[in-house]
Amino acid sequence: MAVVNWKPATWITAWFLLTAPIILWDATYCFMRPRSFEGGDLHWIWEPYSIYQNIDYVYSPEAYAENDGFPNAQSLMNLIETALNLLFVYLSLVAHWPAAPLVGFASALMTLSKTVLYLLNEFYCNFCSIGKLGLRDLIQFYILPNGFWIVVPTLIVASLGREIASRLVSQHTVEKAKKA
């Protein structure tokens, strides 16, 4: 069964395209440590990270000094997710590949899972990275930004999951009719 001229919702494409440079910027901050830290020769590229290196332990010089591998491991996963996001956009809008929704679904599920892991890690270490924050900073610099990385990928997973399920049901119906 061929799916002809399927296009993803514009908001899904927009999310994947708009988040790509943000993720690249974030990942390169982690990969370029200590040069990206406040006081480093390349810090001017990541100036706003002065806030995060003092708010979230994961981005801190202390985590780097302690050889905490999580920031770079997460950054590598971010780059893989972003490559899949951009591949999804290409496969769905340029190549018109019928299985493109599966790539987008997998990528969004990776983003969602990784973000939930990030938050669960914080929960299970008794808020070791952010426990010192006041409520305003916690909401502004942790809950809201991370919330976007949970809510939007969840919506993408739901949307593309429905598309995939619909195609599977349609194919099953066609095959069942052929057998009858």
Image (cartoon, rainbow, N blue to C red):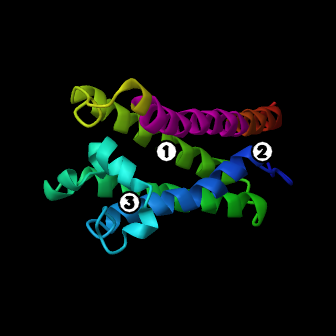
Residue 8 position in % (x across, y down): 76, 48
Element carrying mark 3: helix
Q: Label 3 vs label 1: CA separation?
A: 12 Å
The part of the image, by quadrant, that contains residue 158 is top right
**In this image, 18 relative to 5: left or right?**
left
Please report the bounds of the magenta region as a residue range.
138-164
Residue highlighted by disc 3: 76
Amino acid found under the numbered disc labelled 3: Leu
Amino acid found under the numbered disc labelled 2: Ala
Residue drawn at point x = 20 percent, y = 51 percent: 63
Element carrying mark 1: helix
**In this image, 86 relative to 111: left or right?**
right
**In this image, 6 relative to 132: left or right?**
right
Residue highlighted by disc 1: 111
Residue 3 position in % (x across, y down): 81, 50
Amino acid found under the numbered disc labelled 1: Thr
Among the two numbered marks 1 and 2 on one chain, the one whose residue lies closer to the N terminus? 2
> Residue 9's mark?
2
Number of numbered labels in the structure image: 3
* Magenta segment includes 12: no
Q: How many C-alpha atoms fall within 10 Å of the one at disc 2: few (<14), some, or many (≥20)?
A: few
- Identify the main secondary structure in magenta: helix
